[in-house]
Amino acid sequence: MNYIDIAPWRLLIVLALVLVTSLVVSRRARLQLEKELVVGIFRGALQLLAVGYVLVVLFAAQRAAWVFLMLSVMLGVGAWTSAHRVESGPPLRILLPRALLAIFVGSVAALLPVFAFVIQPDPIFDGRTIIPISGMIVANAMNVVAQVNERIFANAKAERTEIEQWLALGATPKQALEKYVRNALRSALIPTINGLLTVGLVSLPGMMTGQIMSGIAPEHAIRYQLVIMYQLVVVAAVSGAVSAWLARRTLFNAQGQLQLFG
Amino acid sequence: MSVESPCLQARDLAVSLGGRVVLKGVNFVLRPNEVAVIEGPSGSGKSTFLRALATLEPLSHGSLLLEGREASALSVMAYRVRVAYVPQFPVMFAGDVAANVRAGPRLRGVELSDERVSQLLREVSMDPAMHTRVARDLSGGEKQRVAIARALANEPKVILFDEPTSALDPTVTDQILSLILACATKGRAVLVVTHLAAQADRLGGARYECRGGHIESKGA
Protein backbone atom coordinates (compact mmCIF):
# COMPACT_ATOMS: atom_id res chain seq x y z
CA MET A 1 0.00 0.00 0.00
CA ASN A 2 1.28 3.50 -0.87
CA TYR A 3 1.40 6.13 1.85
CA ILE A 4 3.29 9.31 2.62
CA ASP A 5 5.61 8.98 5.58
CA ILE A 6 6.22 12.21 7.47
CA ALA A 7 9.12 12.10 9.90
CA PRO A 8 8.39 13.68 13.34
CA TRP A 9 11.01 16.43 12.82
CA ARG A 10 9.34 17.44 9.56
CA LEU A 11 6.02 17.69 11.40
CA LEU A 12 7.72 20.09 13.80
CA ILE A 13 8.55 22.38 10.85
CA VAL A 14 4.87 22.50 9.95
CA LEU A 15 3.98 23.13 13.60
CA ALA A 16 6.41 26.04 13.76
CA LEU A 17 5.03 27.46 10.50
CA VAL A 18 1.41 27.30 11.59
CA LEU A 19 2.20 28.83 14.98
CA VAL A 20 4.19 31.71 13.52
CA THR A 21 1.81 32.58 10.66
CA SER A 22 -1.41 32.34 12.64
CA LEU A 23 -0.04 34.21 15.66
CA VAL A 24 1.42 36.98 13.50
CA VAL A 25 -1.90 37.43 11.65
CA SER A 26 -3.87 37.37 14.91
CA ARG A 27 -1.58 39.92 16.57
CA ARG A 28 -1.34 42.31 13.63
CA ALA A 29 -5.07 42.23 12.91
CA ARG A 30 -5.80 42.40 16.68
CA LEU A 31 -8.05 39.36 16.45
CA GLN A 32 -7.28 38.33 20.06
CA LEU A 33 -7.36 34.73 18.93
CA GLU A 34 -3.80 33.84 20.03
CA LYS A 35 -4.85 31.68 22.97
CA GLU A 36 -7.52 29.86 20.95
CA LEU A 37 -5.09 29.25 18.08
CA VAL A 38 -2.38 27.80 20.31
CA VAL A 39 -4.87 25.64 22.23
CA GLY A 40 -6.47 24.53 18.94
CA ILE A 41 -3.15 23.63 17.31
CA PHE A 42 -1.95 21.48 20.23
CA ARG A 43 -5.32 20.11 21.23
CA GLY A 44 -6.02 19.04 17.65
CA ALA A 45 -2.70 17.15 17.56
CA LEU A 46 -3.36 15.41 20.89
CA GLN A 47 -6.93 14.50 19.90
CA LEU A 48 -5.81 13.03 16.58
CA LEU A 49 -3.04 11.08 18.28
CA ALA A 50 -5.43 9.67 20.86
CA VAL A 51 -8.24 8.90 18.45
CA GLY A 52 -5.84 7.24 16.01
CA TYR A 53 -5.02 4.57 18.58
CA VAL A 54 -8.62 4.39 19.83
CA LEU A 55 -9.76 3.69 16.27
CA VAL A 56 -7.23 0.87 15.88
CA VAL A 57 -8.64 -0.84 18.99
CA LEU A 58 -12.24 -0.01 18.10
CA PHE A 59 -12.01 -1.28 14.51
CA ALA A 60 -10.36 -4.49 15.67
CA ALA A 61 -12.81 -5.16 18.51
CA GLN A 62 -16.05 -4.82 16.43
CA ARG A 63 -18.08 -4.21 19.61
CA ALA A 64 -21.46 -2.48 19.17
CA ALA A 65 -21.22 -0.78 22.58
CA TRP A 66 -17.87 0.83 21.70
CA VAL A 67 -19.14 2.12 18.37
CA PHE A 68 -22.20 3.51 20.15
CA LEU A 69 -19.96 5.16 22.75
CA MET A 70 -17.79 6.72 20.05
CA LEU A 71 -20.87 8.08 18.24
CA SER A 72 -22.18 9.49 21.53
CA VAL A 73 -18.87 11.25 22.17
CA MET A 74 -18.96 12.72 18.64
CA LEU A 75 -22.51 14.02 19.16
CA GLY A 76 -21.80 15.38 22.64
CA VAL A 77 -18.58 17.17 21.67
CA GLY A 78 -20.18 18.44 18.44
CA ALA A 79 -23.16 19.85 20.35
CA TRP A 80 -20.99 21.42 23.04
CA THR A 81 -18.64 23.03 20.52
CA SER A 82 -21.56 24.30 18.46
CA ALA A 83 -23.42 25.76 21.47
CA HIS A 84 -20.27 27.17 23.05
CA ARG A 85 -19.45 29.16 19.88
CA VAL A 86 -22.70 31.17 19.99
CA GLU A 87 -21.99 34.54 21.59
CA SER A 88 -25.35 36.28 21.32
CA GLY A 89 -27.61 33.43 22.38
CA PRO A 90 -29.07 32.02 25.56
CA PRO A 91 -26.92 30.37 28.23
CA LEU A 92 -25.25 27.02 27.51
CA ARG A 93 -27.76 25.10 29.65
CA ILE A 94 -30.53 26.23 27.26
CA LEU A 95 -28.60 26.06 24.01
CA LEU A 96 -26.73 22.78 24.53
CA PRO A 97 -29.76 20.43 24.52
CA ARG A 98 -31.16 22.26 21.48
CA ALA A 99 -27.87 21.99 19.59
CA LEU A 100 -27.67 18.30 20.52
CA LEU A 101 -31.20 17.68 19.23
CA ALA A 102 -30.58 19.56 15.95
CA ILE A 103 -27.31 17.72 15.28
CA PHE A 104 -28.86 14.37 16.23
CA VAL A 105 -31.94 14.75 14.02
CA GLY A 106 -29.90 15.96 11.03
CA SER A 107 -27.33 13.20 11.45
CA VAL A 108 -29.99 10.49 11.71
CA ALA A 109 -31.75 11.87 8.62
CA ALA A 110 -28.48 11.76 6.67
CA LEU A 111 -27.02 8.51 8.00
CA LEU A 112 -29.96 6.16 8.43
CA PRO A 113 -30.84 5.83 4.71
CA VAL A 114 -27.16 5.42 3.83
CA PHE A 115 -26.52 2.64 6.33
CA ALA A 116 -29.87 1.00 5.58
CA PHE A 117 -29.72 0.95 1.78
CA VAL A 118 -26.42 2.22 0.36
CA ILE A 119 -23.39 1.28 2.44
CA GLN A 120 -24.64 -1.58 4.56
CA PRO A 121 -22.19 -2.23 7.42
CA ASP A 122 -21.26 -5.87 7.94
CA PRO A 123 -21.54 -6.65 10.83
CA ILE A 124 -24.26 -4.08 11.49
CA PHE A 125 -22.09 -2.17 13.98
CA ASP A 126 -18.93 -2.21 11.92
CA GLY A 127 -16.94 0.75 13.24
CA ARG A 128 -14.79 0.99 10.10
CA THR A 129 -17.89 1.80 8.05
CA ILE A 130 -19.93 3.78 10.56
CA ILE A 131 -17.46 5.99 12.38
CA PRO A 132 -15.61 7.80 9.56
CA ILE A 133 -18.81 8.79 7.72
CA SER A 134 -20.61 9.70 10.96
CA GLY A 135 -17.69 11.94 11.93
CA MET A 136 -17.94 13.95 8.71
CA ILE A 137 -21.72 14.23 8.97
CA VAL A 138 -21.72 15.30 12.65
CA ALA A 139 -18.92 17.82 12.01
CA ASN A 140 -20.94 19.47 9.22
CA ALA A 141 -24.05 19.54 11.40
CA MET A 142 -22.01 21.12 14.20
CA ASN A 143 -20.85 23.99 11.96
CA VAL A 144 -24.28 24.57 10.46
CA VAL A 145 -26.04 24.62 13.85
CA ALA A 146 -23.46 27.04 15.29
CA GLN A 147 -23.87 29.40 12.33
CA VAL A 148 -27.67 29.27 12.31
CA ASN A 149 -27.88 29.93 16.06
CA GLU A 150 -25.31 32.72 16.02
CA ARG A 151 -26.98 34.56 13.17
CA ILE A 152 -30.55 34.19 14.43
CA PHE A 153 -29.80 35.20 18.02
CA ALA A 154 -27.46 38.05 16.98
CA ASN A 155 -30.02 39.39 14.48
CA ALA A 156 -32.87 39.15 16.99
CA LYS A 157 -30.82 41.29 19.35
CA ALA A 158 -29.72 43.83 16.73
CA GLU A 159 -33.11 44.06 14.99
CA ARG A 160 -35.34 43.93 18.04
CA THR A 161 -37.26 47.08 17.09
CA GLU A 162 -38.08 45.81 13.61
CA ILE A 163 -39.10 42.36 14.87
CA GLU A 164 -41.35 43.91 17.52
CA GLN A 165 -42.92 46.19 14.92
CA TRP A 166 -43.86 43.15 12.89
CA LEU A 167 -45.31 41.57 16.05
CA ALA A 168 -47.21 44.79 16.82
CA LEU A 169 -48.82 44.61 13.37
CA GLY A 170 -50.12 41.12 14.18
CA ALA A 171 -47.30 38.97 12.80
CA THR A 172 -46.83 35.49 14.23
CA PRO A 173 -43.35 34.82 15.68
CA LYS A 174 -42.66 32.78 12.55
CA GLN A 175 -43.55 35.70 10.28
CA ALA A 176 -41.63 38.22 12.41
CA LEU A 177 -38.46 36.14 12.29
CA GLU A 178 -38.83 34.79 8.75
CA LYS A 179 -36.28 37.09 7.09
CA TYR A 180 -33.61 36.30 9.68
CA VAL A 181 -34.22 32.55 9.57
CA ARG A 182 -33.96 32.57 5.77
CA ASN A 183 -30.70 34.55 5.85
CA ALA A 184 -29.22 32.32 8.56
CA LEU A 185 -30.07 29.12 6.68
CA ARG A 186 -28.72 30.48 3.39
CA SER A 187 -25.42 31.48 4.99
CA ALA A 188 -25.08 28.17 6.80
CA LEU A 189 -25.76 26.13 3.65
CA ILE A 190 -23.45 28.08 1.33
CA PRO A 191 -20.18 26.35 2.42
CA THR A 192 -21.72 22.90 1.80
CA ILE A 193 -23.10 23.97 -1.60
CA ASN A 194 -19.74 25.52 -2.50
CA GLY A 195 -18.16 22.19 -1.59
CA LEU A 196 -20.43 20.44 -4.10
CA LEU A 197 -19.72 23.00 -6.82
CA THR A 198 -15.94 22.94 -6.46
CA VAL A 199 -15.24 19.32 -5.64
CA GLY A 200 -12.66 17.95 -8.07
CA LEU A 201 -11.92 21.47 -9.32
CA VAL A 202 -10.65 23.09 -6.15
CA SER A 203 -10.83 20.49 -3.42
CA LEU A 204 -9.95 16.81 -3.65
CA PRO A 205 -11.71 14.91 -0.85
CA GLY A 206 -9.22 13.18 1.43
CA MET A 207 -11.31 10.05 1.80
CA MET A 208 -11.58 9.50 -1.97
CA THR A 209 -7.97 10.42 -2.69
CA GLY A 210 -6.78 8.11 0.08
CA GLN A 211 -8.83 5.21 -1.28
CA ILE A 212 -7.46 5.72 -4.80
CA MET A 213 -3.91 5.98 -3.42
CA SER A 214 -4.41 2.73 -1.54
CA GLY A 215 -5.35 0.94 -4.77
CA ILE A 216 -9.16 1.01 -4.79
CA ALA A 217 -10.66 1.49 -8.26
CA PRO A 218 -11.57 5.18 -8.85
CA GLU A 219 -15.21 4.41 -9.70
CA HIS A 220 -15.70 2.78 -6.28
CA ALA A 221 -13.96 5.62 -4.45
CA ILE A 222 -15.96 8.21 -6.41
CA ARG A 223 -19.31 6.57 -5.63
CA TYR A 224 -18.40 6.43 -1.95
CA GLN A 225 -17.41 10.10 -2.00
CA LEU A 226 -20.61 11.13 -3.77
CA VAL A 227 -22.68 9.44 -1.09
CA ILE A 228 -20.81 11.40 1.58
CA MET A 229 -21.12 14.72 -0.24
CA TYR A 230 -24.83 14.36 -0.88
CA GLN A 231 -25.44 13.40 2.74
CA LEU A 232 -23.48 16.47 3.85
CA VAL A 233 -26.16 18.52 2.08
CA VAL A 234 -28.92 16.53 3.80
CA VAL A 235 -27.44 17.00 7.27
CA ALA A 236 -26.81 20.71 6.68
CA ALA A 237 -30.40 21.26 5.53
CA VAL A 238 -32.08 19.19 8.26
CA SER A 239 -29.87 20.26 11.18
CA GLY A 240 -30.11 23.89 10.03
CA ALA A 241 -33.90 23.77 9.77
CA VAL A 242 -34.32 22.04 13.17
CA SER A 243 -31.90 24.47 14.74
CA ALA A 244 -33.76 27.49 13.31
CA TRP A 245 -37.08 26.08 14.53
CA LEU A 246 -35.67 25.57 18.03
CA ALA A 247 -34.08 29.06 18.04
CA ARG A 248 -37.46 30.59 17.20
CA ARG A 249 -39.15 28.66 20.01
CA THR A 250 -36.44 29.88 22.39
CA LEU A 251 -36.78 33.52 21.31
CA PHE A 252 -40.54 33.79 21.82
CA ASN A 253 -42.68 32.87 24.81
CA ALA A 254 -46.23 31.49 24.63
CA GLN A 255 -47.60 35.07 24.38
CA GLY A 256 -45.54 35.72 21.25
CA GLN A 257 -43.22 38.12 23.11
CA LEU A 258 -39.57 38.40 22.10
CA GLN A 259 -37.19 37.26 24.84
CA LEU A 260 -33.58 38.29 24.38
CA PHE A 261 -30.58 36.87 26.16
CA GLY A 262 -27.33 38.45 27.31
CA MET B 1 -71.46 47.60 23.70
CA SER B 2 -72.50 51.14 24.69
CA VAL B 3 -70.61 54.11 23.24
CA GLU B 4 -69.02 54.92 26.56
CA SER B 5 -67.84 51.43 27.50
CA PRO B 6 -64.03 51.19 27.48
CA CYS B 7 -62.02 50.34 24.37
CA LEU B 8 -59.12 49.18 26.44
CA GLN B 9 -58.79 48.54 30.14
CA ALA B 10 -55.89 47.51 32.37
CA ARG B 11 -56.79 45.86 35.67
CA ASP B 12 -54.35 45.69 38.57
CA LEU B 13 -51.51 45.43 36.07
CA ALA B 14 -47.92 44.77 37.18
CA VAL B 15 -44.78 44.42 35.07
CA SER B 16 -41.31 43.38 36.19
CA LEU B 17 -38.24 43.64 33.99
CA GLY B 18 -35.07 41.76 34.88
CA GLY B 19 -36.38 41.10 38.39
CA ARG B 20 -37.18 44.81 38.98
CA VAL B 21 -40.80 45.87 39.54
CA VAL B 22 -41.47 48.62 36.96
CA LEU B 23 -45.26 48.89 37.27
CA LYS B 24 -47.60 47.68 39.99
CA GLY B 25 -51.32 47.87 40.70
CA VAL B 26 -52.06 49.90 37.58
CA ASN B 27 -55.71 50.42 36.67
CA PHE B 28 -56.40 52.31 33.49
CA VAL B 29 -59.35 52.91 31.18
CA LEU B 30 -59.37 54.23 27.62
CA ARG B 31 -62.72 55.09 26.04
CA PRO B 32 -63.77 55.33 22.36
CA ASN B 33 -62.80 58.58 20.56
CA GLU B 34 -60.64 59.53 23.54
CA VAL B 35 -57.12 60.94 23.36
CA ALA B 36 -55.29 60.25 26.62
CA VAL B 37 -51.76 61.31 27.47
CA ILE B 38 -49.39 59.77 30.00
CA GLU B 39 -46.60 62.04 31.15
CA GLY B 40 -43.66 61.22 33.30
CA PRO B 41 -39.90 61.49 33.55
CA SER B 42 -37.56 59.13 31.70
CA GLY B 43 -37.40 55.71 33.35
CA SER B 44 -40.73 56.15 35.16
CA GLY B 45 -42.22 53.14 33.38
CA LYS B 46 -44.59 54.94 30.98
CA SER B 47 -43.08 53.32 27.85
CA THR B 48 -43.13 49.93 29.58
CA PHE B 49 -46.83 50.48 30.28
CA LEU B 50 -47.45 51.19 26.60
CA ARG B 51 -45.49 48.07 25.59
CA ALA B 52 -47.48 46.04 28.13
CA LEU B 53 -50.75 47.34 26.62
CA ALA B 54 -49.36 46.31 23.20
CA THR B 55 -48.61 42.85 24.70
CA LEU B 56 -44.92 43.23 23.89
CA GLU B 57 -43.99 42.87 27.58
CA PRO B 58 -45.19 39.99 29.77
CA LEU B 59 -47.48 40.92 32.67
CA SER B 60 -46.41 39.67 36.07
CA HIS B 61 -49.92 40.37 37.36
CA GLY B 62 -53.28 41.69 36.21
CA SER B 63 -55.17 41.58 32.97
CA LEU B 64 -56.11 43.54 29.85
CA LEU B 65 -59.63 43.92 28.51
CA LEU B 66 -60.32 44.88 24.91
CA GLU B 67 -63.86 46.15 24.33
CA GLY B 68 -64.96 44.38 27.49
CA ARG B 69 -63.38 41.01 26.59
CA GLU B 70 -60.38 39.53 28.36
CA ALA B 71 -57.41 39.91 26.04
CA SER B 72 -56.39 36.35 26.92
CA ALA B 73 -59.61 35.15 25.25
CA LEU B 74 -58.26 36.43 21.91
CA SER B 75 -55.21 35.18 20.09
CA VAL B 76 -52.29 37.52 20.76
CA MET B 77 -52.08 38.27 17.02
CA ALA B 78 -55.77 39.22 16.83
CA TYR B 79 -55.34 41.50 19.87
CA ARG B 80 -52.34 43.26 18.28
CA VAL B 81 -54.26 43.91 15.08
CA ARG B 82 -56.88 45.76 17.15
CA VAL B 83 -54.37 47.54 19.43
CA ALA B 84 -51.73 49.25 17.26
CA TYR B 85 -48.40 50.37 18.64
CA VAL B 86 -46.18 53.04 17.10
CA PRO B 87 -42.76 53.10 18.77
CA GLN B 88 -40.58 56.12 19.43
CA PHE B 89 -38.39 55.52 16.37
CA PRO B 90 -40.43 53.55 13.83
CA VAL B 91 -38.36 51.23 11.65
CA MET B 92 -39.29 51.18 8.00
CA PHE B 93 -39.47 47.72 6.49
CA ALA B 94 -37.59 46.93 3.29
CA GLY B 95 -39.30 48.13 0.13
CA ASP B 96 -41.38 51.14 -0.80
CA VAL B 97 -43.94 53.16 1.13
CA ALA B 98 -46.83 51.13 -0.29
CA ALA B 99 -45.25 47.85 0.88
CA ASN B 100 -44.93 49.32 4.36
CA VAL B 101 -48.55 50.48 4.43
CA ARG B 102 -49.70 47.06 3.18
CA ALA B 103 -47.52 45.12 5.67
CA GLY B 104 -50.10 44.49 8.42
CA PRO B 105 -53.04 43.23 6.30
CA ARG B 106 -50.60 41.28 4.08
CA LEU B 107 -49.58 39.20 7.14
CA ARG B 108 -53.12 37.83 7.13
CA GLY B 109 -53.25 37.35 3.37
CA VAL B 110 -55.19 40.57 2.69
CA GLU B 111 -53.83 42.74 -0.12
CA LEU B 112 -54.85 46.41 0.16
CA SER B 113 -55.90 48.02 -3.11
CA ASP B 114 -53.96 50.94 -4.59
CA GLU B 115 -56.92 53.20 -3.79
CA ARG B 116 -56.88 52.15 -0.12
CA VAL B 117 -53.11 52.80 0.10
CA SER B 118 -53.63 56.26 -1.44
CA GLN B 119 -56.47 56.94 0.99
CA LEU B 120 -54.31 55.97 3.98
CA LEU B 121 -51.45 58.17 2.75
CA ARG B 122 -53.87 61.10 2.38
CA GLU B 123 -55.10 60.44 5.96
CA VAL B 124 -51.55 61.04 7.20
CA SER B 125 -51.16 64.11 4.93
CA MET B 126 -48.81 62.45 2.48
CA ASP B 127 -48.95 62.77 -1.27
CA PRO B 128 -50.19 59.39 -2.60
CA ALA B 129 -47.55 59.72 -5.35
CA MET B 130 -44.98 58.97 -2.64
CA HIS B 131 -46.12 55.33 -2.48
CA THR B 132 -43.19 54.27 -4.70
CA ARG B 133 -40.51 55.97 -2.58
CA VAL B 134 -38.05 53.70 -0.74
CA ALA B 135 -39.37 53.87 2.82
CA ARG B 136 -35.96 53.76 4.47
CA ASP B 137 -34.87 56.88 2.56
CA LEU B 138 -37.66 59.05 4.00
CA SER B 139 -37.15 61.87 6.50
CA GLY B 140 -37.97 61.37 10.20
CA GLY B 141 -41.36 63.09 9.87
CA GLU B 142 -42.26 61.10 6.75
CA LYS B 143 -41.31 57.83 8.46
CA GLN B 144 -43.57 58.76 11.38
CA ARG B 145 -46.44 59.40 8.93
CA VAL B 146 -45.86 56.06 7.18
CA ALA B 147 -45.77 54.33 10.58
CA ILE B 148 -49.16 55.88 11.41
CA ALA B 149 -50.58 54.88 8.00
CA ARG B 150 -49.20 51.37 8.54
CA ALA B 151 -50.94 51.21 11.92
CA LEU B 152 -54.21 52.57 10.48
CA ALA B 153 -54.15 49.95 7.70
CA ASN B 154 -55.05 47.31 10.31
CA GLU B 155 -58.14 49.37 11.28
CA PRO B 156 -57.31 49.20 15.00
CA LYS B 157 -59.63 50.18 17.85
CA VAL B 158 -56.74 51.70 19.82
CA ILE B 159 -53.45 53.29 18.76
CA LEU B 160 -50.59 53.58 21.25
CA PHE B 161 -47.92 56.20 20.51
CA ASP B 162 -44.59 56.18 22.35
CA GLU B 163 -42.92 59.63 22.32
CA PRO B 164 -44.14 60.19 18.75
CA THR B 165 -42.29 63.43 18.05
CA SER B 166 -39.08 63.10 20.05
CA ALA B 167 -36.77 63.44 17.02
CA LEU B 168 -38.78 65.94 14.96
CA ASP B 169 -38.52 69.69 14.45
CA PRO B 170 -41.31 71.97 15.85
CA THR B 171 -43.22 72.34 12.55
CA VAL B 172 -43.29 68.60 11.83
CA THR B 173 -44.08 67.93 15.50
CA ASP B 174 -47.19 70.08 15.23
CA GLN B 175 -48.30 68.30 12.05
CA ILE B 176 -47.81 64.85 13.63
CA LEU B 177 -49.73 65.88 16.76
CA SER B 178 -52.62 67.01 14.54
CA LEU B 179 -52.56 63.62 12.82
CA ILE B 180 -52.60 61.84 16.18
CA LEU B 181 -55.64 63.87 17.26
CA ALA B 182 -57.35 63.00 13.97
CA CYS B 183 -56.83 59.26 14.65
CA ALA B 184 -59.30 59.39 17.57
CA THR B 185 -62.42 59.07 15.43
CA LYS B 186 -64.94 56.38 14.50
CA GLY B 187 -64.76 54.92 18.00
CA ARG B 188 -60.99 54.63 17.93
CA ALA B 189 -59.04 55.69 21.04
CA VAL B 190 -55.50 57.04 21.20
CA LEU B 191 -52.99 56.87 24.01
CA VAL B 192 -49.81 58.95 23.82
CA VAL B 193 -46.79 58.71 26.10
CA THR B 194 -44.61 61.80 26.34
CA HIS B 195 -42.17 63.46 28.70
CA LEU B 196 -43.07 66.91 27.31
CA ALA B 197 -45.83 68.80 29.15
CA ALA B 198 -46.27 71.14 26.15
CA GLN B 199 -47.20 68.19 23.94
CA ALA B 200 -49.68 66.97 26.51
CA ASP B 201 -51.23 70.48 26.53
CA ARG B 202 -51.44 70.46 22.73
CA LEU B 203 -53.14 67.04 22.66
CA GLY B 204 -55.63 67.90 25.45
CA GLY B 205 -57.90 65.11 26.70
CA ALA B 206 -57.38 63.01 29.81
CA ARG B 207 -53.96 63.39 31.41
CA TYR B 208 -52.14 60.89 33.57
CA GLU B 209 -48.81 60.84 35.29
CA CYS B 210 -46.56 57.81 35.61
CA ARG B 211 -44.45 57.91 38.75
CA GLY B 212 -43.06 55.25 41.05
CA GLY B 213 -44.62 52.41 39.10
CA HIS B 214 -48.15 53.86 39.34
CA ILE B 215 -50.29 55.75 36.85
CA GLU B 216 -52.46 58.47 38.34
CA SER B 217 -55.02 60.75 36.76
CA LYS B 218 -54.16 64.45 36.50
CA GLY B 219 -57.59 65.36 35.17
CA ALA B 220 -58.40 66.78 31.74
Image (cartoon, coloured by chain):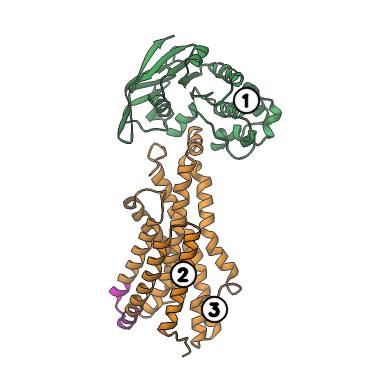
Q: Which residue is mark 2?
A: A20
User: What secondary structure is found at the residue carrying circle 3?
Assistant: helix
Q: Which residues are magenta?
A: A55-67
Distance in Å between CA atoms under marks 3 and 2? 37 Å
Asked if the stretch drawn in magenta spans residue A62, the answer is: yes
Q: Secondary structure at mark 1?
A: helix
Contact (Cβ within 8 Å) of mark 1 with mark 2: no
The residue carrying mark 1 is B120
* Amino acid on which the number 1 mark rests in the picture: Leu
Residue A222 — which label? 3
Q: Residue at x 40, y 49 (%)?
A: A89
Q: Quadrant of the N terminus of chain B?
A: top left
Residue A167 at what x, y percent from top left? 48, 36
Location of residue A193 (image quadrant): bottom right
Indicate whether B23 appears above or below A155.
Answer: above
Letter of the chain shown green in the rendering: B
- Magenta stretch contains residue B15: no
